[in-house]
Amino acid sequence: MNSLGETNLLFVLGAIAVMFAVTFFFFLRSLVESRERRLSQRLHEASDDPADRLELPADQPMKPLSDFLLRTGLGLSPEQAVGWMTLVGVVLACVLFLIRPDWWIGLIGLVIGCAAVWVTLLVYRYRYRLKLQDQLPDTIFLIARSLRAGLSLEQALTLVGNQGVEPLATEFRKANNQVKLGLTIPLSMELMSKRLQVADFNSLVSTINLYSATGGNLPLLLDRLAASTRDQNQFRAFFRSATALGRISSLFIAGAGPLFFMGYALLEPEYAEFFFSSQAGVMTLAMATFLELIGLFWLWSIIRIEY
């Protein structure tokens, strides 16, 4: 092995060692924090004071990554997310480096592995939001029927938290705990709206705030809001089914270029090395990446619907 190959090998091995050390640190820290949370939860469940069981994540400034992970429904901490990204990236980099012992192949594998975990989190966040959106009409109908049965608004929200469908019921339980501590119902619903980031839920918050300020026939307003939300969900479902073929085709078209480039980099490396060994090749790759991003944004703009 020549000196350049030895340098590449030492560089990759050093990077892999650092990545594994960072991954081990993050996983160890997440395990300790998870154990502390379980112990704290047991102590809170054993307490009779509602204030001890209160969780106010929306009252404190949240970091962007924590806020993002909260909306995935996976219950991951930022340390766990970074640990998974590092672990998958390092494993993929090692596999590609064993296939082709070049440092830039390992670097590409590291980037792809981290990006794959991030895309998976994006998919989980999208699915979590769709689940909340699908559960919203039945939840609003349940609140309206509870009010017609003679329950107060606070009792109706408590009923949804205790007998509703997960994961939306969990969010209502958090809001109920805030109300027990002394917050008003409109304020607790606004905090819940900030956590969920669901557009149609903002309409429910506005309706409850309007009722708290001026009064009126709240069950009737909620029935109309639930019917409107259900119509919007049906329209979105119809639109997704009608554009499913186009969206899947766009994914294959968008992924064809990077996959072919990776295939050439692994099987015919002399073709791929030209792009990294000359200024024209680097500029070509940069232009291709830029055009790829423009095409993805254009396709996303076409299939995006607002109703």
Image (cartoon, rainbow, N blue to C red):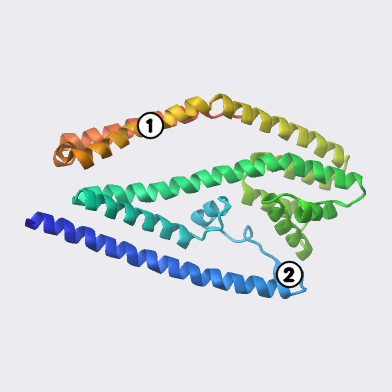
Residue pictured at 74% horizontal, 42% vertical: 204
Placement of 117 over or under 276, stated as above or below: below
Would residue 208 appear left or right of 200 to someone viewing this image? right
What is the three-letter code of the residue carrying label 2? Ala
Residue pictured at 70% horizontal, 43% vertical: 135
Which numbered disc, 2 or 1, marks the residue that appears first in the sequence?
2
Labelled disc at residue 254 = 1
Category of crowding for the residue at label 2, using alpha-carbon neighbours closer than 10 angstroms: few (below 14), some (14–19), many (at least 20): some
Front residue of this view, candidates 1 and 10: 1
Would residue 298 appear left or right of 161 to someone viewing this image? left
**The N terminus appears in which quarter of the rendering?**
bottom left
Placement of 192 over or under 276, stated as above or below: below
What is the three-letter code of the residue carrying label 1? Ala
Where is residue 39 drawn, in percent x and y? 61, 74
Would residue 304 appear left or right of 238 to someone viewing this image? left
* Alpha carbon distance from label 2 to label 1: 51 Å
Where is residue 105 drawn, in percent x and y? 23, 48
Instruction: Kindly indicate whether the residue at mark 1 contacts the one at mark 2 (C-beta within 8 angstroms).
Output: no
Labelled disc at residue 51 = 2
Count up the numbered dots: 2
Where is residue 137 drawn, in percent x and y? 74, 39
Can residue 129 be seen here?
A: yes
Placement of 295 over or under 155, stated as above or below: above
Would residue 106 appear left or right of 171 to someone viewing this image? left
For marks 2 and 1, give the one nearer the viewer.
1
Where is residue 299 drawn, in percent x and y? 45, 28
Placement of 11 over or under 189, stated as above or below: below
Residue pictured at 84% horizontal, 55% vertical: 155
Q: Tag 2, which secondary structure? A: helix
Residue pictured at 66% horizontal, 73% vertical: 42
Question: Of all residues shown, which one is farthest toward the right?
Answer: 150
